[in-house]
Amino acid sequence: MFNQRAVKKEGYPGEQTAVPEVVRRSRYPCRLSMYSDAPDVEVSIEEFETFALDRLQVLRAIEDAQLRAKGEDDMRKRVNEALEKHMPSHTNRSKLPPRQLVGERRKDHVSHFILRLAFSRTEELRGWFLRYECALLKHRFQNADLAEKQELLSSAQLRLAHLSPADRGAKLGNASSFYAQQEQLFEVDFERVLDLVGRSQVVLRAGRAFVPQSEVATLLIHEFRHTLTQALSVCAKALPQMGEDERLLPVLQNLSNQTARSEYQSTGAAGAVTAESVVGLSDSFPLCMQHLHSQLARDHHLRHGGRMQLGLFLKGIGLGLQDALVFWRRAFSAMTDDQFQKGYAYNIRHNYGMEGKRADYTPYSCHRVIMSNPPGPGDHHGCPFRHFSSERLRAALHKDSLPDPEVREVADLAQAGHYQVACTRHLELRLLHRRQNNQPQPDADIRLSAVTSPNQYFDLCLGCTKPAPPAAGADTASTAAAILSGAPKAAAAIY
Ligand code: SF4
């Protein structure tokens, strides 16, 4: 499918001449594409992975922006920043060398098809990919110049029936006043523009919708969604045939797993936290761990799910095995030593890889806490943003002394099903209030990428109390320290 040799052999015709003409004669004359043809180029495994990961970053940035942007302008800015960083794509009017323009478009083309394959595996993955690819095309179309829009529309073959001015009165009657007179109208089946129908932007007559020129993008996205849906089904059927390719399949699997966000590597070194210091650190725990910790203190006991979730989290922040045994023994103060040894000590040693199959268990990610093993009566594990009732969540948020509008903002995000975004906003507000206590700054805000693990939350939250290391690295603790010390947003890798 990918054959780069042809391009290499041919080079880029007329490379020394004017850019638009040269690029127009290449296989990528326009930077916008409906991706109707699979690429016929060879790509190395490294390129295969890098291209796909870069596109994934863009799609995830769109997901983040849709959930968290403050208005259309903010949304456009966030997506443009992600595109500029991971997948720049310049217009034919840019002064860039042809090789670079074509290279950008080749990357766009190839990366789309790699993710098509990677995300065709399950219905959930197909839905995710489809949603954000459509959003990406829409964003690019809206930001394209007129010539690019026309080129894409003509390549998309939208099969539009133009409504002549003479037909307007006959087909629309009085409703023709709904449209401006000079606007061109196209007649299509209403299913193709459900979005416009839902927003009452078109007139309907006998199952046909009359779409003005200004809303043709909706038709374009509908067409793209339709063809991509079919293409993903075809890919899903073809995927098992790739089972023999040991190089590609793990890469594809790894790519699709990353919508659930990759596993966070805890920064806590074993032994960094003692049984005594856990209480002092609990102020920087995420809500799930604060809840488990307070229930443990109240009941002197936690059921299995809670012990696993809290125990592995504490292991991740640096509580070593011996201190873990001391911590849990003290916490379970209502039972005898014998009961503790027989009923609980084995499990603690097991979590540290000292019993049973001696696996080194890692802390749970948010995805795992949210998606698996919901808490029953008497259980305290789980994610408060997912598993608490709205009233209970608001009460828990009020404990942090957040003002009512902020509690409402976070609770509304959780109510809408954006659990990790709600948790991230909660963290941002906590960090912001800490910073405001040191240096009041009206209208200041903090924006972080979505929290993926309770341990990442802890590292970010705790980072604010540590001085930032001299060279600003990529670790999350220094990121939080940079934020709280008022460093520019770019230093904190914030969308
Ligand atoms: S989103 Fe993650 S860190 Fe936050 S409360 Fe839920 S499980 Fe804990």
Image (spheres, rainbow, N blue to C red):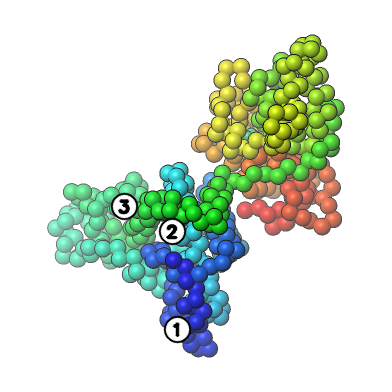
The residue that mark 2 highlights is: 138
Secondary structure beneath dot 2 equals helix
The residue that mark 1 highlights is: 21
Visible in this render: residue 320?
yes
Q: Residue at x 59, y 46 (%)?
A: 261
The residue that mark 3 highlights is: 193
Q: Is residue 141 left or right of residue 183?
A: right
Tell which residue pokes out farthest to the left in this image: 170
Q: Residue at x 56, y 44 (%)?
A: 260
Amino acid at pointer 2: Lys
Q: Nearer the viewer, residue 226 or 265?
A: 265
Q: Which is more N-terminal, label 1 or label 2? A: 1
- Give the answer, above or below, for where 363 lies relative to 207: above
- Give the answer, above or below, for where 2 lies relative to 134: below
Classify residue 461 by image quadrant.
Answer: top right
Q: Which is more N-terminal, label 2 or label 3? A: 2
Q: CA separation, marks 2 and 1?
A: 26 Å
